[in-house]
Image: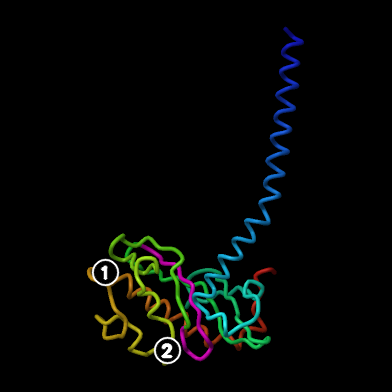
Amino acid sequence: MLKTMQKHGVTLALFAACSTGLTAAIAQLTKSTIAEQAAIQQKALFDQVVPDNIYNNDLSQSCFLVNAPELGKGERRVYIARQDDKPVAAVMEATAPDGYSGAIQLLVGADFNGTVLGTRVTEHHETPGLGDKIELRLSNWITSFSGKTIAGASDSHWAVKKDGGDFDQFTGATITPRAVVNAVKRAGLYAQTLPAQLNSLPSCGE
């Protein structure tokens, strides 16, 4: 009986060791593939908010950390687009804290002269069928920011039509688009201050 138990114990130990080794090997083999896919998805998202014909650097390698109330609470990532090493635009993580159902996370692309190049929602909890029209898969509303210029903090065009501005609100849901419009405006204004800060901003890898 003891020998049988010992035999089974050794078998189980060998099986566990083989399984652990196999799992580790698979994880190592798939790690690079997962990283490559994540990089491809990130690049595709960047290109939705900043046209790829205006820059030629690797945005993921031009990442800086900022603490800017205009973008939201806490540390945010800002990616600087460069054309032949000259900064031309920024991709910024931003938050609209006052969505109907909580904070709305955004990615905003803008040049340094007040023009928003593109915006995408990366996370939200807005009401399905109402506020969720901020998603590109449900509506093209989010594309209405592309090419719009902000003429200073008091620019009245940067508001929903209900508030006298240029941007549509949704039927039965004004709070959500209002929050996004205001957040994009703040990010676009902040982008104009970035060129003077670039030499002092910490990179994401530090």
Which image quarter holds the N terminus?
top right
On the image, the x and y values in percent for residue 11 come to 73, 22
Residue at 37 percent across and 90 percent down: it is 154
103 sits left or right of 62 in the view: left
111 sits left or right of 58 in the view: left
Residue at 56 percent across and 84 percent down: it is 89
Q: Amino acid at mark 2?
A: Ile
Residue at 55 percent across and 74 percent down: it is 67
Q: Secondary structure at mark 2?
A: loop
* Principal secondary structure, stretch drawn in magenta: strand
Location of mark 1 (residue): 173
Up the image or down, 135 lies above or below 23; here it is: below
On the image, the x and y values in percent for residue 110 come to 50, 83
Q: Nearer the viewer, residue 50 or 2?
A: 50
Return the residue found at the far front. 53
On the image, the x and y values in percent for residue 39 come to 61, 65
Q: Nearer the viewer, residue 158 or 206?
A: 158
Location of mark 2 (residue): 150
Return the residue found at the far left. 172
Q: Amino acid at mark 1?
A: Ala
The answer to which of marks 1 and 2 sits earlier in the sequence is 2
Q: Tell me the quarter of the picture where residue 10 sits.
A: top right
Q: Secondary structure at mark 1?
A: loop
Mark 2, Cα crowd under 10 Å, few <14 / some 14-19 / many 20+, is: many
Residue at 66 percent across and 82 percent down: it is 200
Mark 1, Cα crowd under 10 Å, few <14 / some 14-19 / many 20+, is: some
Highlighted magenta segment, given as a residue range? 102-116
